[in-house]
Image: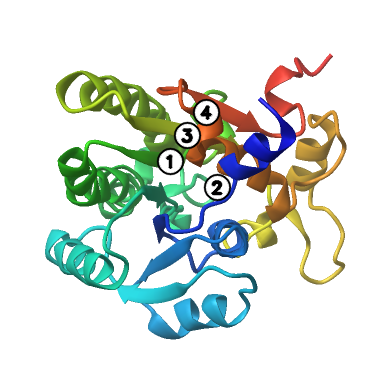
């Protein structure tokens, strides 16, 4: 294999990618990178204005559209599938980036584990788990009919090393790891070995949801939790959105055509460090 062949593997021209959670910091960067590599990108969003803002920041040869959709509403996902197919003709890749936490599902001095509201826990489980499973059912069906496709789930370091306080989020992300492996086997055996399912597990990246937990908004200095995370990250910093792009492009590209059912940490060494 020569350099030209290697470069061609990362040319996404003519390939279509659906991204849930594409209005967030991390998946927004993925959307921009894929468009830069020539992909047709469909950002699934409940808030069209946020989606349009991501599209406005894109550069490169790829096309991008915003499609209304709610990862917990199967009807909107089915309608989104129709729109994407009408626009791009096929669906080659799905990135399941929708997810997050709820402050009411996080323990703190005034909210103990024994008092966490059931509704908050259900919200976190549904958003992360069902919000990954339902898009796989709807968009994955199209891949099954095509006989090929790639699904990329977004896990977390908290899936394998549960973080203190965030019980619902950690448990839900652990479920995504298990689901990734299950679905990889199921689709390869029952439908086509050319349908692959993998996941990336980001370490600590600053986003809208966790910024106030890690950075003091008044002093702009690390909080106690932020200092603890950096102390346990051998590379000594938080991740930048672009740090995920290499792993994402590899898993979506033909360069990883014999890879399915894995979860790749992108964490600055956090998962390798024992703390000693």
Quadrant occupied by the N terminus: top right
Q: For mark 2, what is the residue? A: 108
Q: Is residue 214 above or below residue 185?
A: below
* Residue at image mark 1: 152
Q: Earlier in the sequence, mark 1 or mark 3?
A: 1
Q: Are marks 4 and 2 in contact (CB under 8 Å)?
A: no
**Badge number at residue 25:** none
Give the mark nearest the N terminus, 4 or 2.
2
Name the spot of residue 272 as percent of width and height, x first: 72, 18
Query: Mark 3 sits on what residue?
Result: 199
* 100 relative to 42, above or below: above
Instruction: Write the residue at 23% across / 58% down.
Output: 72
User: In terms of depth relative to the viewer, which is nearer, 110 or 88?
Assistant: 88
In the image: residue 153, left or right of residue 186? right
In the rendered image, the residue lying farthest to the bottom is: 49
First in residue order: circle 4 vs circle 3: 3
The image shows residue 66 at horizontal and vertical percentages of 39, 76
Q: Is residue 232 left or right of residue 71?
A: right
Quadrant in which residue 53 is drawn? bottom right
Bin the neighbour count of mark 3 within 10 Å (Cα to Cα): few under 14, some 14-19, many 20 and up.
many
Residue 101 visible in the shown view? yes
Q: CA distance from mark 2 to mark 1?
A: 33 Å
Classify mark 3: helix, strand or loop: strand
Labelled pair 2, 1 in contact (Cβ < 8 Å)? no
Front one among 252 and 180: 252
Q: Looking at the figure, which quarter contains the C terminus?
A: top right
């Amino acid at each position: 294999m020569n350099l030209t062949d290697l470069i061609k593997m990362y040319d996404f021209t003519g390939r279509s990618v659906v991204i849930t959670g594409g209005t967030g910091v991390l998946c927004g960067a993925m959307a921009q990178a894929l468009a830069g590599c020539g992909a047709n990108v469909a950002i699934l969003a409940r808030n069209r204005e946020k989606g349009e803002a991501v599209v406005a920041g894109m550069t490169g040869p790829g096309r991008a559209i915003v499609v209304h959709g709610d990862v917990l509403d199967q009807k909107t996902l089915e309608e989104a599938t129709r729109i994407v197919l009408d626009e791009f003709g096929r669906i080659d890749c799905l990135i399941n980036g929708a997810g997050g936490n709820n402050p009411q599902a996080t323990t703190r001095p005034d909210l103990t584990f024994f008092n966490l509201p059931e509704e908050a826990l259900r919200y976190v489980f549904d958003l992360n788990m069902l919000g990954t499973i339902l898009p796989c059912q709807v968009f994955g069906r199209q891949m099954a009919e095509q006989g090929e496709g790639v699904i990329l789930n977004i896990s977390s370091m908290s899936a394998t090393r549960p973080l203190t306080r965030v019980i619902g989020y950690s448990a839900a992300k652990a479920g995504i790891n298990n689901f990734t492996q299950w679905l990889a086997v199921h689709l390869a055996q029952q439908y086509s070995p050319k349908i692959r399912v993998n996941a990336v597990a980001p370490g600590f990246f600053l986003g809208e949801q966790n910024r106030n937990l890690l950075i003091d908004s008044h002093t702009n200095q690390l909080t106690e939790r932020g200092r603890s995370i950096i102390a346990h990250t051998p590379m000594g910093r938080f991740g930048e959105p672009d740090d995920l792009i290499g792993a994402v492009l590899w898993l979506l590209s033909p360069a990883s055509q014999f890879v399915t059912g894995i979860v790749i940490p992108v964490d600055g060494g956090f998962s390798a460090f024992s703390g000693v």
